[in-house]
Image (tube, rainbow, N blue to C red):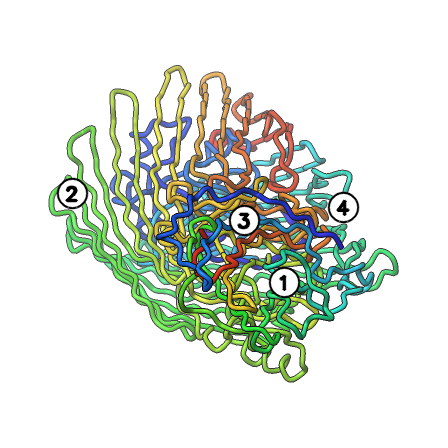
Amino acid sequence: MKKLALVLIIFSGLKSLEAGAQTFQPTGDSIITRELDEIVVTATRNERQMGAIPMPVSLIPKSQIKTMGSLRLNDVLTEQTGLVVVPQVNAQGNGIQLQGFNPDYTLILLNGEPIIGRYTGSLELSRIAVGNIKQIEIVKGPSSSLYGSDALAGVINIITDRPSGKTGNVSARYGTNQTMDLSADVGFTNDKLGVYLFANRYSTDGYDLSPENFGKTVSPFSNETFSARFDYRISPKTDLGISGRYFNENQKFNFEVLSGSELVRTSGTGSTHDYNFNPVLTHRWSNNLKTIARFYTTHYTTDTGLSLESDGSLYYTDDFTQTFTRPEINAEYFINDRNIITVGAGFTSESVRTSRYGDETLRKQHTDYGFFQYEWIPISKLTVIAGGRYDHNSVYGSQFSPKLSSQLEINDRVTLKGSMGVGFKSPDFRQLYFNFTNSAAGGYSVLGTEVIANKLAELESQGQIAAYLFDPSTLGKLQAERSVAFNFGGTFLLDKVTVNTNAFYNTVDNLIETQAVAITTNGQNIFSYRNIQRAFTSGLETNVSYPLGKGLSLSAGYQLLYAMDKDVLKDIRDGNVFYRDNETLVTKRLKASEYYGLYNRSRHTGNIKLFYKNERHGWDASLRFIYRGKYGIGDIRGSIQGEVVPPSDVNNNAVLDVHDNFISGYGLVNLSLGKTFFDNIRIQVGVDNLFDHTEPIFIPNLPGRILYGSLAYSFFKNQSKR
Amino acid sequence: MSILRSVLFLLTIVVSLSLVSCSDDDEPSLPVAAETVENLEADPATGFDPNTGQPIGTTGKFKLFSFETGDVVANTDSATTKWDIGFRGTTIMVNGGTSGPGAAQAQIVNGLFDEITEAPETGFVSDNKPTYAIPTGSGNGWYNASAGPPPTIITPIAGRVIIIKTATGRYAKVEILSYYKDAPASPTGNEPARYYKFRYVYQPNDTRSFN
């Protein structure tokens, strides 16, 4: 969901480090053994059968997305075991929490290339329409050995449709909040050429969870997505694929913002554009050797302007432009069926220009990298994959990220898999160059580590520093955040029941945390960043699927998660952390068992889904129950529609413990029913959030009950069931 | 200005003459009691500037307090040893060093108020402006200040106990309980601030023991 009523804050790091777990995706309409044969590309950067991948991988096929009636990427991901879609601290956008990590720790790829344009580390998932998605692949555990920075928690790769025969579809959906979605796609292929075009328009009136306050929780917006793909067979051994995407979104806001001590009304507009261009040249030198040359360039820009309603004067502006360009070449070499080598190299060039860094200067960084991977299958029941990647970055230096994984098929019913790997996340532009004073939220400032020394000297000479809270000379250069991760699990076939389970342990060092550095003479805090925290996330994810027969299949997923700050845990064990009952004002010593862990993580999350498909009569249906257990929120000090978000910690120890206030656990029930007529007309109706659960302040990205109906028409009958 | 004093509870420790060191005149010590002070006005604001949101009406003066009398001391006595500790906003001074003519020093100990049965022998420091024996700044001394946009919420950190060597060389331990008027359970930062609630134990005799 999108741009909720304001007040941005810039705290990342541990407070927001988020989690998830792993397994196969239980699909409703296919049994697991069939799923094991599905081809996935993300885990090894080569096309491999899912059942042969020795790490936790799951796949969401198009058919499931259609049955769920999803429109945007966040709709799909929020229903997957081990993925928690969380509102961001600034309430702007949805991020994905995977294995207990914040959204900035999961790399989100579109056909293998990163989507840019993150806001305070979080990528707005609703930017991605799902109408042209072939499948979504999710790899849990660090994948920096193949993908470099940001793949610390995992990778989500969105694979879009490719040209395949003659296709032509149009669809329209209308629902609550005047939400209208129009999609069309057309494609054809011949011996040499394939073309696939997709267009989507989405518009909504937004929604208002606190009607008593000025403005809407989500302001009205509309967006358009166009994507195109051309496949051309240059020769029997050489293929060229070219894909591109253009996205444009516009939104109208009404905000109440704090100016001095008064709330003033503002209105304005925001716009976001992104586009990318991605040619890929594949050449098969022999049956054993294939090389792929890829080029990717993408551009993201967003602008916001707010004016005072009283006199129309400009109150606040914000602009942000980011570019990312990457050429890469890689090769896959089959020494024989039991020994496969993949190598690759490339470089990325990134730039950011934004008002948030104070001066609209173009900031650049580039990374050179190389990676290798060796797949070894000594016996048919055993697969071992060893790999690593070396990155050298112009700002934060070099990183080596190795990974080792293996899978052993014990018998027809039991397969075990285990992996260990290193992940990293580089300091981002914001942590280096931020030079931002938030006039819309009181006037505090955030300064990146590369600019703070000069800026403090300037303020000091102007006599604006009242006091230092932290010695700024010790801030130093930011290091990349690093993790070591262990995943161990397996697949068990018990009669008709399939159980997938994975236990994970991630230990993270050098987490970058916000640090208050100084107070200005007018009482505002100045923040910067430093490497400080050590944390771990650990848990167990399990998915069970059971085909009930007659087209019905039942699945259930559950994740248990512990995500904790190691330093806090040590302090508690040493007896140095206390809590004060805020009614009786009696202080007690906190026990380790009373520590709940990091903010915004639920210990328990899960889902139960029932899918139905009757091919013969064209019916499909689903009933999904999605649960998120209780969790705490940190001292984000943001406000939603003018209402301050109260932090969970109420007992004076700055630690989330069992005596604090929690946001209660909640379950959502979603229903859908579809019917296909004449093989080419499909009608679907559905309800999301059947029981109309809302939490205006704490979960502003959760709209109330959504009713919808849709109609789809296929011009070519054989494509209608795709 | 009214200071409510209430006896929270009497420590039920039986005084053992052999354990408690005697005062100079060899009189047996009586058990010391924990006292609670509420709504001590530490230079509160009378209002807010509508343009800047900054508090107005503050005097810049510390509210002085004596552990021996358990009551506030007039600012006219600031150059005497009649007071031990002074409060102004989040800043707490003690009567010594750069703050006053007394011998008062302080240090912060991490622990449970009731478990601290004896003042440390060493580790006391004097006020030395611009630094104070009780450090100022979020997380440094007795309080945390919320980050982010105003209003800032001041929360006394659980487990931080201030140990004071008084102006006349006796010992006291202090736990700050609230910074807001009438000690609301969940302050939002909008309540009248600079109203201290704290409890203390004062040892009138020449011993470091708080029993």
Q: Is residue A38 left or right of residue B181?
A: left
- Judging by the rendered image, the residue that carries numbered circle 3 is B34
Asked which secondary structure carries label 2, the reply is strand
| Secondary structure at numbered mark 4 | loop
Residues at marks 2 and 3, CA–CA distance in whole angstroms: 70 Å
User: From the viewer's perspective, is the residue at label 4 or at label 1 nearer?
Assistant: 1
Q: Residue at x 44, y 36 (%)?
A: A80
Instruction: Give residue A174's position: percent from left, percent from top.
Output: 67, 32
Q: Is residue A217 left or right of residue B25?
A: right
A384 on left or right of A622: left
Q: In the orientation shown, which residue stands out farthest toward the left?
A: A379
Quarter of the rendering containing residue B85: bottom right
Q: Chain of mark 1?
A: B
Among the two numbered marks 2 and 4 on one chain, the one whose residue lies closer to the N terminus: 4
Q: Where does residue A370 sit, x and y in percent of width and height?
A: 31, 66
Q: Which of these two is toward me, A133 or A527? A: A527
Q: Which residue is mark 2?
A: A382
> Residue A305 sits in which quadrant?
bottom right
Residue density around tag 2, few if under 14, some if 14–19, many if 20 or more, within 10 Å:
some
Q: Which residue is mark 1?
A: B90
Q: Please, what is the three-letter code of the amino acid marked with disc 2?
A: Leu
Query: Which one is in front in this view, the residue at disc 4 or the one at disc 3?
Result: 3
Looking at the rendered structure, whether the residues under marks 4 and 3 are on a common chain is answered as no
| Residue identifier under label 4 | A215
Q: Would residue B181 be seen by someone viewing this image from the given angle?
A: yes
Q: Earlier in the sequence, mark 3 or mark 1?
A: 3
**Same-subunit check for callouts 2 and 4:** yes
